[in-house]
Every structure is written in structure tokens, then in C-alpha cells.
Image: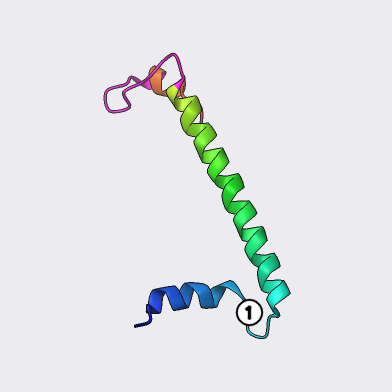
Amino acid sequence: MRNPLLTFILGGCAPKGSNPDAVREHTADATAAFKRDAKAVAQGVREGWTRDKSVDINSASREQLETLTA
């Protein structure tokens, strides 16, 4: 039984008429972008865990909230 969502996702990865080399190149580019983005997310989480000061955003004062970085 074919999964329609999987067919849609995989079908959208490569334009019609693409040759196998173009599909492989597109897949390699997408994989590299995913790895880069995942690494950036992991770095952001790591930075958040190692901060000295934490702020409870539900009860923080305006001054405390203004000390947060984006």
C-alpha cells in the first residue's frame, strides 16, 4: 500500500524530467542544509543551557525581560 504523504513529499523533491544525477545533487544539497540547520539549533540549545542567568518569562519584570537576547 502506498503512502500518499510520502509519495507527495518524494514527488516534490525533484522536478519532472530530472535525470538521476540532478536528483542526487539536489538530495546532497538538501542533506547538507539539514545538517547545517540541525547544528545551528543544537548550538543554540547548548548556549541556552550554559547561560548563567535564567529568567522565568511568566513572572519576570520588564527590566529582566529586556536583558534577554534574541
Apparent side of residue 27 relative to residue 5 in the rendered image (left or right): right
Q: Residue at x 69, y 77 (%)?
A: 20
Note whether 68 is above or below 16 in the view shown.
above
Foreground pick, 26 / 44: 26
Helix, strand or loop for disc 1: loop
Relative image position of residue 33 (x, y in whole percent): 62, 53
Relative image position of residue 69 (x, y in whole percent): 51, 27
User: Would you identify the image quadrant in which residue 17 lies?
Assistant: bottom right
Direction front: furthest residue: 1
Note whether 23 is above or below 48 in the view shown.
below
Q: Which residues are magenta?
A: 50-63
Q: Residue at x 34, y 83 (%)?
A: 1
User: Would you identify the image quadrant in which residue 18 lies?
Assistant: bottom right
61 in the magenta segment: yes
Q: Which residue is mark 1?
A: 15
Q: Residue at x 62, y 59 (%)?
A: 30
Label 1 environment density (alpha carbons within 10 Å; few <14, some 14–19, many ≥20): few
Note whether 33 is above or below 61 in the view shown.
below
Count of numbered badges drawn on the protein: 1
